[in-house]
Amino acid sequence: MVNIIADLHTHTLVSGHGIDTIRTLSEFACKKGLQAIAITDHGPGMRGGPDFIYFLSLKRMTQGIDLPIRIIHGVEDDIKNRKGELTLSEEVHSNLEIVLTGIHPFTWIAEQEITVRTDAVINAMQRGVVRAFTHPVGTYSDVYIDPVIEAAVKNNVAVELNATKLNEKKIVHNYLEKCASFGASIVVNSDAHLGEEVGTFGEAKRILQEVSFPKELIINSNKERIASFFRIDW
């Protein structure tokens, strides 16, 4: 069974609907034996999300946390138009190590019809800032998954297997089979909103085994892959 060494999609109380701090999430990650955790709170495009100043301060806020784990500074930002622009500025994104995007309720992209949503996601990938597309299936608003996976491969963007959105097994299996067929890199994440959820990958691992998903396409199973793919120092 594949080993996942890092949880690259987590939320603190700063996101507005999480309940724990950066320190608490990191402590739970250590207890789970993880080597890294990415703090990826929602951007201001999501209701309750923090303003840009939080992300400019994120690196400083983690410097005093003395734990045997790599804390990666990131954001799960939202797409604000069909051109694929995100709500935070390039200056803020450049201060972070991982920029994720997904589709969330009550955001601009969630209110669009599926063709516009799909175009916006693909255009966001082409802009070169987004490094992973979160919860592509089993969530709030669908996209046309084939062209999204193709765009992810073309633009070297990962797509996510979200451990909290696995209820529709047939859809998840089909999605993973498409990822394998296209040669798309994936990240397996918890999307944790409280400490206990960090690193909860058991069901996701079982599904990956069921579909015989290629281990070499799983980015966060290996420290070197994470550092290389996301271009971070570790």
Image (spheres, rainbow, N blue to C red):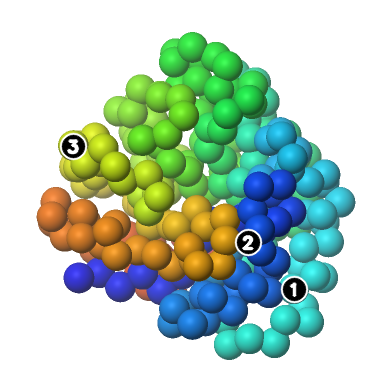
Q: Which residue is mark 1?
A: 62
128 is higher (above) or lower (below) than 75: above
Q: Which mark is residue 186?
A: none
Q: If the image is split into quadrants, where does the C terminus sit?
A: bottom right
Is the Cβ of the residue at disc 2 closer than 8 Å to that at disc 3?
no
Q: Amino acid at mark 1?
A: Thr
Where does residue 86 sit, x and y in percent of width and height?
A: 67, 34
Crowd band around label 3 with a 10 angstrom C-alpha radius: few (<14), some (14–19), many (20+): few
In the image, taking residue 187 as reference, residue 65 lies left or right, namely right
Q: Which residue is mark 3?
A: 170
The residue at 56%/67% (across/down) is 195
As measured in the structure, the alpha-carbon distance from the residue carrying label 1 to the one carrying label 2 is 10 Å
Work out whether residue 135 or residue 164 is closer to the camera in this orientation and state it. 164
Q: Amino acid at mark 2?
A: Ile
Q: Look at the numbered disc 1 and give the secondary structure of its residue.
A: helix
Work out whether residue 60 or residue 21 is closer to the camera in this orientation and state it. 21
Is the Cβ of the residue at disc 1 closer than 8 Å to that at disc 2?
yes
Crowd band around label 2 with a 10 angstrom C-alpha radius: few (<14), some (14–19), many (20+): many
Q: Which mark is residue 39?
A: 2
Q: Is residue 65 visible?
A: yes
